[in-house]
Image (cartoon, coloured by chain):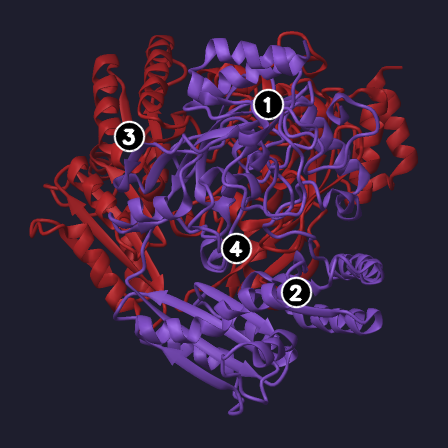
Chain colours: A red, B purple
Amino acid sequence: MTALDELGRHLADHLPADRLATDAGSTWAYGMDNSRVHHAPGLVVFPDSHAEVTEVMRAAARFRVPVTTRGRGTGTAGGSVPIDGGIVLVTDRMTRVIDFRPEDRLIVVEAGLINADLQRIVGEKGFFWPPDPTSNALCTIGGNLGCNAAGPHAVKYGTTRENVLGLRAVGGEGQTIKAGSQTTKGVVGHDLTRLLIGSEGTLGVITEATLKLTPLPETRRLLRAFYSEMHTASAAVSRVMAQPATPAAIEFIDGNALDLLRRNSRVDIPAAAGAMLMIEVDGDDTGIEALVKRIVTAARGGDPQVDIAVAETAEEQASLWAARKALSPTLRQVAPKKINEDVVVPVSRIPHLIETLDEIAARHRITIVSFGHAGNGNIHVNLLVNPDDPTEMVAAETALTEVFDAVLALDGTLSGEHGIGYVKRDFVAREIPAESLALMQGIKRVFDPLGILNPHKKLPDPPASNASR
Amino acid sequence: MTALDELGRHLADHLPADRLATDAGSTWAYGMDNSRVHHAPGLVVFPDSHAEVTEVMRAAARFRVPVTTRGRGTGTAGGSVPIDGGIVLVTDRMTRVIDFRPEDRLIVVEAGLINADLQRIVGEKGFFWPPDPTSNALCTIGGNLGCNAAGPHAVKYGTTRENVLGLRAVGGEGQTIKAGSQTTKGVVGHDLTRLLIGSEGTLGVITEATLKLTPLPETRRLLRAFYSEMHTASAAVSRVMAQPATPAAIEFIDGNALDLLRRNSRVDIPAAAGAMLMIEVDGDDTGIEALVKRIVTAARGGDPQVDIAVAETAEEQASLWAARKALSPTLRQVAPKKINEDVVVPVSRIPHLIETLDEIAARHRITIVSFGHAGNGNIHVNLLVNPDDPTEMVAAETALTEVFDAVLALDGTLSGEHGIGYVKRDFVAREIPAESLALMQGIKRVFDPLGILNPHKKLPDPPASNASR
């Protein structure tokens, strides 16, 4: 009997029957995420609580079987793909609200709760939880925590790590981890909360989270500004970020993306536009007009040529968002298997990056389309390639290496929120020097001495250790 | 020749002469901080750069001599006291600004820069760095980082950990640690930045920090509100925190502290006042009045008895702050050797805590005076005792234990920003369960396998390891 068989028997004895799936027909779908990677799980468990996760992890440790935790599999980096098989631990059944205290601006939830469901629950009391990735109708809080996801509003409200007070998790030997507290200040012990956030299930299985809530703004406005080219748009971003009225979001779309929309969508883009910004402003009814005026002034920078529209009603705002929303479907249609990166550079260096991207694209004869969260310098770089064309794929691979080199030369980072998972692991050592990497691998061994927590993810495998199994 | 002598010789050979002090007359003062603990250093080093800190740490590792890092020694928990002697590493000479880029809302500085000097430098370009402890005229950025210091404005702008992008540090074997990046998003590798912040020099010597800057608000108002007792004041705090206009600070002073001011200062406190809130509001000129109105409404909660004053000019604001500012000198005068704690509870539980404190004080016949940062639930609890009176000190010790029990029963934490250092170490295991503590001690071993980085601080010594030296 294999270790997996023994483990399956053990779990069947210790968990209710509906917590396990072992037949390949049921488990196959849990071997993939939104990357193009698939590995078949050995078995899939659906624990119902922190206690059951503890049970699973203790058993996995006993039989030395790897555990890959999974929310809804919306990740794009293969983070929830079980590379070595073993257990896929699905958090779908852990969707409870354990405590909700608007008076303390906090909610305690289980990790499997869907982001949009959370927003609905806290919205009824006038709050929101700032992280809202595009996939928020599907993705779980646990997934948001695992990737330190952010979305467009991070420019004003921070990423996941700035919006969590504490966590409960299970480590690689089945031990319970209590991290953080229910308060916004606290310095007792080391910061395990931020260490677990963004660790992509490699240090522990997050089961419960105490989330810091923010009161919903009273009202919103949306600005759309067209610029002749990326440099002037980027200078506008820096001007907007240098004055006190921080917008709730600053999204940008580069000239290549606007061209794509002109050719492939019904969105009306002026011929002279070489870059577009979408700026969301939120605040209270009495102050919002003054805020908008300031941000329009900063976005215009004294140039009467900049074409700025301000949407007040929800309908007008939806209509302005149309161009941005049309982008992803258009990209999918034009290049269904595009390579999508998620780099970040300091805000003032965005135009430099975009220039370099154009130069790389021209040299390798591939199309690169960029858009993203300009206020954070977070650029989604899309290489529109056909993975069935080996010549184009070789060119893309070289191009990608050059993109990463450019990002690092600009003091940027290789992933803002999509995570490293499995597919970007080979690039980590370019950004993180060996001595720091060794510390991270040491931390991994502390939390997971047997190397069973989501192996082959987040960090390069160390030369010879349990973690490389 | 002792290891310390050998180390002294080695450093004298490798560093310029003015970097070392070895005679007891010069080194004695570096053995204490703002706690009442003193241990004599073996030698004091004043490195001038990251490279020199690396030199010191490599030598310390080679000769197995402990290293205690120190800014200006304003800490109250003995964190910079060299318990085992050895090296005190002073960051006083590392005060350079390495890079200042307002367009990216960031500044890179060395760890020895004084907080107030930083504020002046970035203020000239219209920015501030939100952490501003009361000691900001003296304390260093490195000290702020080591303790995750916050100050009154954390309620709106977060603590140190929310205002740092990246760090450079030196680990316990002299290795260079690169943590974080120059961007507000980033998920490559594990979060060493937040791990080092608040670690009180036990995981590494922070040499350089990339700080996230915030634009200065255009204008400020100050509200002072008197309530009949703490419950109504605390309910007001919850109401203020439940609406979208988050104040820049909410400070509170309890009834005992008001009594103390009535008896010992010339500040005018109404006879009916049993609690006071000071609320700072910041924003832009056009929106500020609307913000103030909202916050006054929330602070009043429909009760016409609440006595609220709003100060507009800087002079009026200074006059309103008088009561709060008079408190620390008055306390020092009345009880020069008071025990000062720094607990935190969820905001809605402040009145429950204050009630319990009153009950504990009455039972042990000691006076407890509380004030603090209400918006974060961070309460400075002062036990007005005479340490030369053994009976009172025994009572105080029991009372303190009961205070901590009460805080933990309310899901609070034992220190908000003062840190654990040496003097609060025995209480850590009350808050942090053994399994989580073991992980923290494991992390410590990864960063500092020889146990030479600020030994006997932050965490209890593990049963038998190098770290307990």
Q: Is residue B459 left or right of residue A381?
A: right
Eye-nearest disc, 2 or 4:
2
Residue at numbered disc 4: A129
- Which mark lies nearer to you, 1 or 3? 1
**Is disc 4 on the same chain as disc 2?**
no
Tag 4 and tag 1, C-beta contact below 8 Å: no
Disc 2 target residue? B335
The residue lying at 65 percent from left, 76 percent from top is B256
**Is residue B23 shown left or right of residue A312?**
right
Which of the numbered marks, if any, corresponds to residue B428? none
Residue type, numbered disc 4:
Trp
Tell which circle, 4 or 3, labels the residue nearer the N-terminal end: 4
Q: CA distance from mark 4 to mark 1?
A: 29 Å
**For the residues bearing labels 1 and 3, Cβ distance under 8 angstroms:** no
- Circle 3 packing at 10 Å, graded few (<14), some (14-19), many (20+), is many
Residue at the limit of the structure toward the front, as seen here: B25
